Amino acid sequence: MDYFNQESERLVYRKVVEEDVESWKEFFIDNDRLHFLGMANNGDIEKYAKDWINNQLVRNEKYGLGHLVAIEKKSGDFIGLVGIVPREINGEKYMEIAYSLKPPYWGKGYGTEMATHLKKFGIQHKVANQFISIIHKENAASIHVAKKNGMEVLFETKYLDMDVFIFGVRV
C-alpha cells in the first residue's frame, strides 16, 4: 500500500511537504466557505496555511494517513487537499474522508473525484470498516458530494462548536 502516491482520473496525489504552505495560502483567499471549517474569513492567512500543513505533517507521520496534495494532471496545479483522516467524535474513533478545494476549482467535480477515490482506496486496503465525513449543516456542496460517495447521515452533533452532520458508510 502506497498511501502517499496515488492517482485518479484527473488528479495525482502526493504527500504534503512543508513547502506546500505557500501554495495552500490560496485556499484562504476569497473563500466564503471558511466558516464551514470553523474559521473566520478575516483570519491570518499565513497562520492558517502554516498550521494546516504542519498538522498534516504530524498526522502523516503519526498515522501514515492524513491529507494528500491533489494535483490536477492537465495543468500541474495544486488544487486542494484530500485524505483519510483519523478523528474522534463524542469519544468514538472514526476515519474521515476529508477534502478541501481552492475556490477556483469548486463546482468542477473534483470534490467527488477526490472523495470517491479515497473511499475506494480505504476499502481496497482495509483502512477501516466505516468511513465518515463531517459536514457543516449548511454546506450543501459537501452534502451533495457525501451522497454521491454513497454516504448517508448517521447522526448530528457539535464539532468545533459547529452544528454538523456525520455522514457515513459501512464497507
Image (cartoon, helix red, strand yellow):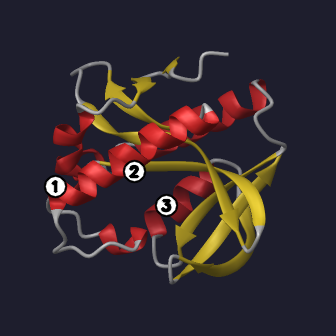
Please rate how many residues cluster around mark 2, counting C-alpha atoms within 10 Å: few if below 14, some from 14 to 19, many from 20: many
Residue 5 vs residue 103: left or right?
right
Label 3 or label 1, whichever comes before in sequence order:
1
Mark 3 and mark 1 in contact? Answer it, CB < 8 Å.
no
Please provide percent x and percent y for residue 71. 33, 27
The disc labelled 2 sits on which kind of residue? Answer: Ser
Please give the label number shown on residue 46. Answer: 1
Residue 109 vs residue 145: left or right?
left
Name the residue nearer the viewer: 101 or 52. Answer: 52
Query: Is residue 107 among what the camera can see?
Result: no
Query: Is residue 15 among what the camera can see?
Result: yes
Please provide percent x and percent y for residue 144. 54, 60
Please provide percent x and percent y for residue 23. 19, 39
Please give the label number shown on residue 100. Answer: 2
Q: Is residue 104 above or below residue 75?
A: below
Judged by depth in the image, the label closer to the viewer, 3 or 1, is 1
The disc labelled 3 sits on which kind of residue? Answer: Ser
Name the residue nearer the viewer: 134 or 109. Answer: 134
The residue singled out by tag 3 in the image is 142
* Distance from the alpha carbon under mark 3 to that under mark 1: 25 Å
Quadrant location of the C terminus?
Answer: top right
The disc labelled 1 sits on which kind of residue? Answer: Glu
